[in-house]
Amino acid sequence: MVGAGFSMLDVSFTMLMLSFVIKKAARLAALLLMLSAVAFALVSLSPIDPVTAYVGADMLRVGPEQRARIAERWGLDDPPVERYLRWLGQVAQGDLGVSMIYRQPVIEVIGQRFLASLGLMGAAWLCSGVLGFALGVLAGGSAGSVFDRLVRWFAYVLASTPTFWLALLLLIVFSVELRWTPICCAMPAGIAPEDVTLAQRLHHLILPAATLSILGVANITLHTRQKLIAVLESDYALFARAQGETRWSLIRQHGLRNIALPAVTLQFASFSELFGGSVLAEQVFAYPGLGQAAVPAGLRGDVPLLLGIVLFSAVFVFTGNTLADLAYQLLDPRIRLAQLA
Amino acid sequence: MASVSLKRAPKRVVTFDVFNRRVRTLGMIAFSVAVLAVMMLLAQVLGVDGLQTRLDVRNQPPSWANPFGTDWLGRDMFTRTLQGLTISLRVGLIASALSAVLGLLVGLAAATLGGWVDAAITWLIDLFMSLPHMVALILIAFVFGGGVNGVIASVALTHWTGLARVIRAEVLQLKTADYVQLSARFGHSKMWIARHHLLPHLFPQFVVGLLLLFPHAILHEAGITFIGIGLSPHQPAVGVILSESMRHLSTGYWWLAVLPGLALLVMVKSFDALGENLRALLDPRTAQE
């Protein structure tokens, strides 16, 4: 009987999971469809001529006939809706076109660069999460103290700090003055990519990751602090205090469990800011990630790459939000998938 | 023993706590306004005299004559920073004003028209929020061909969503409020209700929303200018100054990057403090604390 009960539970869980996945996938598809239409419409309005952008420095050597041929080959004279549908059809097959700047398929550019960014963003995401949570707990546990005021002040100032300025600051202190860290890039110059050791890669990762971590800390610290104070003011905390629990054992027993969930959710929901921050940080450190590719794509009018990055970053943010929903399900038994999807 | 506890007690009283919360809020507002006013006035008083090329004082570290040092052309960095901040302020002002008006109109439309308009607007806001801010900024700046127009358009078009949501929620809540319903039963016209009941609630929200948009607008303007998509080098905003300083980083001229960025941080923080404190003051729940 018990076995049957379990398998019943499993079946219903699998069903729920399946419907969750299907609903999420449908939402993502709808989002991408709309986003692609809006982005495509916006890009076609741009005064920057794609042929001129493509030709670039060879401007003088390309005559009007050649330009017309390029425009014809790309189908630039067709009506926008027709072009959009053709592009969408190719995107659906996984073909995002060829990047003009990097002269290789957009999907490859995004794939390679996202791998580099993933290390950076992953490290920053973990560091800021752990550090921010710890700071938030310490500040919330000692609310009103000098330490608490200091942490709050620090977090509020960080919220107004330009990402790229913080990156420059770290670069000046640690790379120029102290010479502890390299000044740029993801690996030492003059070494074949396959000869670069993991230690060298990590060495180059420290500063960009530190920039994003420091900025990511502010939000989660303030949030955790607030939640912990709310827990400590609750009736069950008062009851536990009356039973003789000390403040820190109370936080360990009752506090952490209740504030971990919103913190994890918040951290997953921060994918959007993480991606935005990586654009600026990668620019300062010349770190060859996806964010650094977004800049020339916009600057030099590499439309296929720009559209590819727009769609990809939306998928990235969507993934973060979906993971936040799943984290709820795993960490809080009161919340069920059916409610979320 | 008694003397020990007497001695310890006053230690917890920090001088700031002498004033009550409201006075402190007013004080912070006055202080923020003063900081910003001093910055803007200094930019006017100093003028552009310091911007002339003087090759005899190139790359000087900060001193009394040049508080922020000089750059590779001997230009006074303090003057450049203040002028740059003025440009950023102007661009930020236009962009956030446009954005706030857009947010207000969209929020009002969503709340009053309802139905499919509301659904479409909610959906549009979700669409905007599905994209990282920086990517949206780059996309829109590109669409408008970069430059000043690109910056203003991209910042204005990416910052209205928050305020639109606030306004929409506020109007929806007001519409069902008892006193508004009662007022309608008393025979007051819709315009009368809008002017006497809705406006007094929405106006503070709008002003605070506008003020709180400001720091974000300036930060994002500086951000996209820094990466080169925003203002051109002919308009030396802070973002341009900082991106130029990158080329002189390895030479050890730290003041080129550190001090203008710090000034930008002070300006953004002042606006932020101004907005937050004004909100605390206007919100009846926190005004008298």
Image: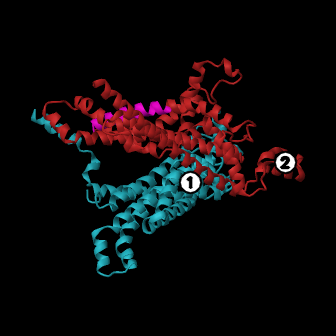
Foreground residue among B130 and A124:
B130
Residue B71 in percent (x, y) is at 65, 44
Label 1: how many residues lie within 10 Å, few (<14), some (14-19) or many (20+)? many
Amino acid type indicated by mark 1: Leu
Residue B55 pos. (x, y %): 71, 45
A339 vs A72, nearest the viewer: A339
Res B85 label: 1
Q: Please indicate, yes or no, whether residue B45 appears anywhere in the rendered image.
A: no
Residue A59: mark in rendering:
2
Along the line of sight, the residue nearer the viewer: B162 or B233: B162
Q: Position of residue B101 (x, y in %)?
A: 50, 65
Q: Vertically, is A2 above or below A78?
A: above
C-alpha span from label 2 to label 1: 37 Å
Tell me: A290 left or right of B219: right
Magenta extent:
A124-143
**Image hue for chain B:** cyan
| Residue in the image at 45% along x and 59% along y | B163
What is the crowding at mark 2: few (fewer than 14 residues within 10 Å), some, or many (at least 20)?
Answer: few
| Residue A127 on the magenta span | yes
What's the chain of the residue with tag 2? A
| Label ID, residue A314 | none
The C terminus of chain A sits in image quarter: top left
On screen, B2 above or below A32?
above
Image position, residue B19 (x, y; %): 26, 54
